[in-house]
Image (spheres, helix red, strand yellow):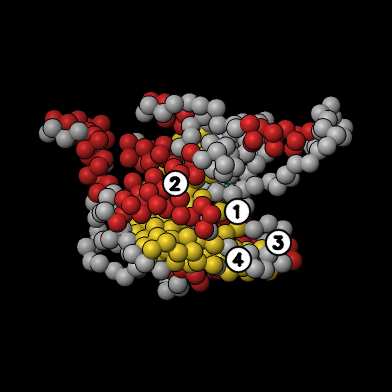
């Protein structure tokens, strides 16, 4: 096996810098043919978020910019927006009122990936995950180690708990039990929804190379240190440059024990469409849980294949409120309505 330090030293002696090496690895392309619906960039949201999330990524892709820049800049939009309470800055905190973020990135041409989990104080965890992929020999870095790594790369440590998120957390805490000393206000109207929203951004560039990102603040009120599917390669995200990219949102524990995103990629490799592959994951999770009657949660899958065909399915939801995916391609901005396996 090549000694990594020796390799880096040799490259430096040849006048090739580490960032230049990382970049050249990033730019490696395995395919030069033009295929049908690409370039395309996809996210696991509908009209409301889709357009503003996908715009910066599409601008990069249509100008033949770097695929990884496209998915990162699009994912950064939700990470930096305090109005989204399930991703990045403004995300709902853990049970102690601390925001802990999870994110992963995967790049098809090199089959490389990076992730951070339970990282605190950094608004854009997907950008840190990208640096784990490009500037380390590791794949997952968690907790304080992830924050220290981000600081080493110049990221600012900031308070991610917005006033809005703090108030929702406080109401939750005050209403937890009537056996403790925390009292809710008399006019206690508050949002009880325990979110585990997330966003996936997937893209295929003009030469058919594929990349993806998943980023989240995870399950609201989680036990500190809990990690969901989003930073786990194969659960919340998987990319295979010969097949496509898949991302997941929803109850992370189910996506972890089904390896949901990897399962969908293997379904597509075996010939299923992205839509059929997303439905197959939902069916598998329902089966693992003992059938439709046993399901009291949901997961949503989004997928794109190498040709730029897309699919979206969720385990359950309200009739008329089908799960959505937005994409931007040469045909413009579009929203696809997916399917539910169980309609309530
Ligand atoms: N899917 C996000 C989470 O469970 O953390």
Task: Judge by depth and name the residue closer to the eye, 132 or 302.
Answer: 302
Identify the residue at horizontal 70%, vertical 37% (top origin).
168
Would residue 23 be found to the left or right of residue 73 on screen? Answer: left
- Horizontal and vertical percent position of residue 78: 49, 44
Q: Quadrant of residue 19?
A: top left
Numbered circle sitting on residue 75: 2
Of labels 4 and 3, earlier in sequence is 3
Q: Mark 3, residues whose alpha carbon is within 10 Å: few (<14), some, or many (≥20)? A: some
Residue positioned most to the left: 14
Q: For disc 1, does the CB lie below 8 Å from ligand 1?
A: yes
Closer to the eye: label 1 or 2: 2
Identify the residue at horizontal 24%, vertical 51% (top origin).
28
Local secondary structure at mark 2: helix
Numbered circle sitting on residue 52: none
Task: Judge by depth and name the residue closer to the eye, 212 or 48.
Answer: 48
- How far is the residue under mark 3 from the one under mark 1? 13 Å
193 lies above or below 225:
below
Q: Which residue is mark 4?
A: 322
- Horizontal and vertical percent position of residue 220: 65, 41
Numbered circle sitting on residue 250: 1
Identify the residue at horizontal 79%, vertical 33% (top origin).
174
């Amino acid at each position: 096996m090549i000694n990594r330090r020796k390799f880096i030293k040799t490259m430096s002696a040849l006048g090739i810098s580490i960032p230049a090496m990382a970049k050249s690895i990033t730019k490696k392309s395995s395919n030069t043919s033009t295929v049908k619906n690409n370039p395309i960039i996809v996210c696991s949201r509908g009209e409301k978020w889709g357009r503003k999330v996908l715009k910066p990524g599409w601008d990069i892709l249509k100008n033949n910019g770097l695929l990884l820049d496209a998915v990162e800049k699009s994912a950064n939009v939700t990470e930096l927006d305090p109005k989204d309470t399930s991703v990045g800055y403004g995300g709902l905190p853990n049970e102690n009122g601390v925001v802990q973020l999870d994110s992963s990135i995967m790049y098809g041409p090199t089959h490389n990936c990076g992730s951070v989990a339970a990282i605190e104080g950094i608004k854009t965890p997907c950008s840190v995950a990208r640096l784990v992929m490009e500037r380390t020999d590791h794949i997952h870095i968690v907790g304080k180690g992830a924050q220290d790594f981000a600081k080493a790369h110049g990221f600012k440590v900031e308070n991610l708990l917005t006033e809005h998120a703090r108030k929702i957390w406080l109401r939750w805490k005050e209403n937890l039990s009537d056996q403790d000393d925390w009292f809710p206000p008399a006019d206690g109207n508050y949002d009880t929804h325990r979110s585990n929203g997330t966003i996936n951004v997937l893209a295929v560039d003009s030469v058919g190379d594929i990349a993806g990102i998943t980023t989240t603040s995870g399950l609201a009120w989680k036990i500190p240190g809990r990690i969901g599917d989003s930073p786990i390669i194969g659960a919340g995200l998987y990319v295979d440059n010969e097949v496509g990219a898949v991302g997941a949102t929803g109850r992370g524990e189910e996506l972890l024990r089904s390896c949901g995103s990897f399962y969908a990629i293997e379904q597509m490799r075996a010939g299923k469409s992205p839509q059929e592959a997303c439905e197959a994951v939902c069916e598998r999770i329902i089966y693992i849980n003992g059938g439709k009657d046993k399901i009291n949660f949901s997961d949503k899958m989004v997928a794109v294949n190498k040709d730029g065909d897309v699919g979206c399915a969720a385990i359950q939801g309200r009739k008329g409120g089908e799960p959505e995916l937005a994409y931007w391609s040469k045909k413009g901005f579009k929203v696809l309505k997916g399917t539910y396996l169980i309609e309530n």
